[in-house]
Image (tube, rainbow, N blue to C red):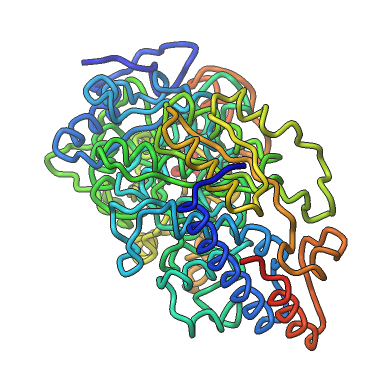
Amino acid sequence: MTISVATQVEVRHLEQRAHSLRRRMLRMAADKGEGYIAQGLGIADLLAVVYFRELRHDPARPEDPGRDRFVMSTGHYSIALYSALAECGVLAEEDLATYALNGSSLPMSTFDETPGVEITSGSLGHGLGQGVGMALGLRLDRSDAKVVVELSDGELQEGSTWESAMSASNFRLDNLWAIVDCNGIQADGPMVLDIEPVADKWQAFGWQVREVDGNDIAALVEAFDELRPLPGPKVIVMRTTPGSGVPTIVARERAHFVRVADDEWNRLIDELEENRRD
Amino acid sequence: MIETGNRTGSMGEVAEVVGPYEVAPFGHTLRELARTDDRIVGITADMGRYSDILPFRDAHPDRYFNAGVAEQNTIMLAAGLAKVGKVAFAATYAAFLTRRALDFMAVACAHSKADVKVIGGAPGLVNPYGGTHQALEDLAVMRSIPDVTVIDPCDATELRQVVTLAARTAGTFYIRNLRGKVPVVLDDSTYDFRIGKAREVRAGSDVGIISTGFMTARALEAADRAAEHGVSVGVLHVPTIKPFDRDGVLEFAASKQRLVTAENHLRIGGLGSLVLEELYDAGEAGRPTIRIGLRDRFHPCGSQDYLDAMFGLDVPSLTTAAVEGRWEH
């Protein structure tokens, strides 16, 4: 892929952000002792691109009605979302240390009371439909804000996702984006029900589709840029590597929910630093 | 006036409505409210015609969304619209909403305290399609979800007031929708619906009927018939299943020798259960109480009158319960 010098600088900046997000996630998981860290590390590059390039938002005013919405449908990846919200200044650093602890405002699965969190999720198949509703409402108000919904490959097994996908193209929602995180793992192991061909399915449902390596920031940037001018809802099907950036976690056999020994976290953080790509 | 749907009591057979009625009070009320409140939007799941929402659609087509045969998405769209500042009325059959879309009502709506007003048509035993279309358990189900206001109006007057108040009150509502030609029982100039308030609609000293939904109209008629037998029957109408008017019910029950509860719903988890729970908790459980409601079974197809008589929701059954203190079902 040929990209401009300006974009190379931008990509390098986003890679630094992604690295910072991964570092935050490991620290939060270390504090808690567990977490959906593999998936979080996998979507760090996407969150860097979304929060530091694609979303129009003011971290000082997370409830601003004119903001672009980022809807994380995979509520159990909250560790990744909280990291991004802290990285851009919506959440305070000290809050992150409370992740999933007793009485925390940062639960294991997202609640929409948390600043910057748009929907309560964790029950899968909820994000896209609410994103469609938000996009309809914003269009009704003649707002130019857009809605970006992240969902996972496992959620493609939820019938509700396809009801929503069908309606989005019918309503010709130019302001709606979906990002499908295909990390190939689900609770019972590697994909327990085949969902391929993913890109073809979205195309058949009337969406503009790009398929990329979700751990390649330059490729993500290019996909956003290519899709932006196209009419109707747009979807990026991204293939991610669970644990991306930390080889030991990648090597765990397609881990859905990672538990590591208490003394192991610092070694994982060191490993992340050794493997930094930016 | 736009006619939508059919008579409340029957989809297949349009029965005569005796006495005054209004056509599609939900849809006409929503249309009027939307003239001055541009936050109001309407969503249906291929049931626009049968949920009485067409008057709204025709006046405000840009604010009307048909999600197709997709109840889960219907509720998600409503939640998403609410989250960008709309007041979303989602209307289709009660059975499809409360069974299929339940997780979405619980998580996307109630958990977020979203301004979604779920309008469940054909609730209880009101159509000839049989069990697939009969929401016999909707009140029990919706009552068990935190932060949902649950309302079973008794007539067109009350339904109009309920819809108006719901549009102006934050949070998630489940409202049973009386469709088509809806009888007028209450006088709009004197009746004043309040969320969470029961209303004594007939004073009486011997027996107390505590009723919800369209059973209140029948309770009033049963009270008239009981009077002919020398039995004085009071009627307490309880439109709001949640929040429940505990104090109002206890006060009404305190002066009665016997109680009858009446609902167009399973005896499991509905008004009768709720009344007994509250009486028990208050140490008032000793009073003889008959619960009129549906048996624990799926019910067959049939006209409203046929089903009412077969399953004891009719005026003679209520009268027998009030006068003789027994009920056959």
B300 w.r.t. A274: above or below? above
Q: Nearer the viewer, residue A53 or A260?
A: A53
Image coordinates of residue A154 in percent, x first then y, are 71, 46
Residue at 49% across, 85% down: A94
Left or right, A60 with respect to A83, comes to: left
User: Residue B7, relative to residue B324: is it above or below?
Assistant: above
* Residue B224 seen from this side: no
- Image quadrant in which the C terminus of chain B is located: top right
Place of residue B118 in the rendered image (x, y in percent of width and height, measured from the top left): 41, 41
User: Image quadrant for the N terminus of chain B?
Assistant: top left
Closer to us: A243 or A128: A243
In front: B83, or A150?
A: A150
Horizontal side of B306 relative to B155 (left or right) equals right
Q: Residue furthest right?
A: A253
B145, A252: nearer the viewer? A252
Q: In the image, B114: left or right of A223?
A: left
Figure check: A206 above or below B109: above
Q: Answer yes or no: is residue A4 visible.
A: yes
The x, y position of residue A200, in whole percent, is 67, 27
Q: Which percent across, then down, holds residue B91? A: 41, 32
Q: How many marks?
A: 0
Q: Residue furthest front?
A: A5
Q: Residue at x 30, y 18 (%)?
A: B18
